[in-house]
Amino acid sequence: MNRKRLKIIYLSLITFTVLLVALGQAFPMGKQSSYSVSAESAANAPASGQKKKLVMGTSADYPPYESVDAKGSGEIVGLDIDVAKYITSQLGYELEIANMDFNGLIAALQTGRVDFVMSAMSATDERKQSIDFSDTYYAARNTIVSKKGTPLETEASLSGKRVGTQLGSTQDLYAATIEGAVLKKLNKIPDLIQELNSGRIDAAIVEDAVAVEMTGSNPELVMNFLPAESADNGYAIAFPKQSPIVAEFNGVLAEMKDNGKLDEIVQQWFAEEENESRSLLGLNIDFSTLNGYIPYILKGVYVTLLFTLVSALFGLVWGTILSLFKISGIKPLEWFATAYTSVFRGTPLLVQLTIIYYATPQLFNYDIPALMAAGLAFGLNSAAYLSETIRGGIMAVDKGQREAAIALGVPYRKMMIRIIFPQALRTILPALVNECVALLKESSLVSVIGVSDLMRRADVVRSDTFRSIEVLLFIAAIYYVLVLILTSFARMLERRLRRSD
């Protein structure tokens, strides 16, 4: 392959990336937290025509408190959202909502990513040690959800049973006090339903409003109330320690309770809905639950492809540099490249992703966007693997090629670009394709920090419908089609490169 073909390939990739970015600007895929101000700076900001901004953290997988309106606007809606919008509007703040996993909300508060949290979070004594809370705005009751065939109705009946809870929730803390229960902690409510339907757990402990939704969407499940607890553990708004806006929020909450506005919002979101289910071939599968959600899910294809392409290009460039370090003969560069590869191949990718996302604001005072953090983490990780692949490809080129170039006085840079790299690329192309396929499939990990990719949108639909298997099968088919397209392009490129053989 000559230099002209290399230029065509690289220019095509760059052009495709620019087009994806341009499309993303023209057709935004949903709101992400792009800029955050601290509560202290918001409270002390001078009065002006521009509203002060507060960023609210939530886990939008817990209807009716917070969920994504996937069939409509795609915005986050719910009881907590309406309460937050009313309070911030009364105080003159502009509200921005950041969606993330429930077990990351407290960390987001402590690292300054968000200014307050509303996500059906109870003001427990354990949480009060690390964060502050407002007055409670709603008190819910815990319920047991189990199968109709083997109902579990009391706390005593849970002894010796496998009980599922949402990690970090009040129900999780309550379940830990049940004597003899075997606990299984999961990140999301839809995961509990799937485990219950598959028989991996005997019961799930959730709050009453969620239990009504669960049993309504899954007729084979039944709910039973547990004894009411103290109202001291009701749902409240969470703030960083010594936040100056707690008193302001409490003042508006008190007004809402007095004028009936809070009750009005609660009644709006706790209206009963009827659900009709149609199973497929007698199985507990009902693809009609996806009606209205497919356009929302397909929008995640853009985010997944953009993230994969940017990560792959960044990993390829940085991996090439690292491979040159390893064969440079300069000891400090060799040591750096070797240590880098050892660290990034020796630690889990998910750990690297969460460290970059949560530690960057705390260490460098920069609120890195979720998509940028994901691209950086995956690119850095991919470069560690690609550096070894590229190094192997370069070393596989016959030594005579290099010796002949040196004897002819060809400069090192020209030799690598025109002679060595083109031959190495033909050798390592299958490995590069495998890495791109791995990046495409592993992109589902970015959903844990709130990036609206395919997996995150599937989680939104799961939380909205309280059914899992249908949407998971659908996005599995999408991933499979994307991988087939990618491998087809790779085969075409490989055949083109081997025409000269």
Image (cartoon, rainbow, N blue to C red):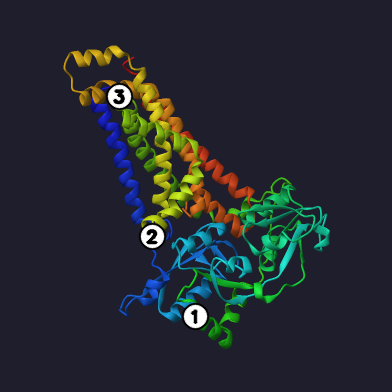
Amino acid under label 3?
A: Gly
Q: Which residue is mark 1?
A: 247
User: Can the viewer see residue 404?
Assistant: yes
**In the image, is residue 390 above or below residue 228?**
above
Instruction: Give the mark nearer the N terminus: 1 vs 3.
Output: 1
Residue 286, position as x, y percentages in the image: 66, 51
In this rendering, the answer to whether 57 lies above or below 403 is: below
Tell me the kind of residue under disc 1: Ala
Tag 3 secondary structure: loop
Which mark is on residue 329?
3
Q: CA distance from mark 1 to mark 2?
A: 27 Å
| Mark 1 to mark 3 CA distance (whole Å) | 63 Å
> Is 268 in front, or is 402?
402
Give the quadrant of the C terminus: top left
Q: Is residue 74 visible?
A: no
- Residue found at x 27% / y 28%: 6
Any mark on residue 34, and which? 2
SS under mark 2: loop
Q: Residue at x 59, y 49 (%)?
A: 471
What is the x, y in percent for residue 426? 36, 22
Secondary structure category for the residue under label 1: helix
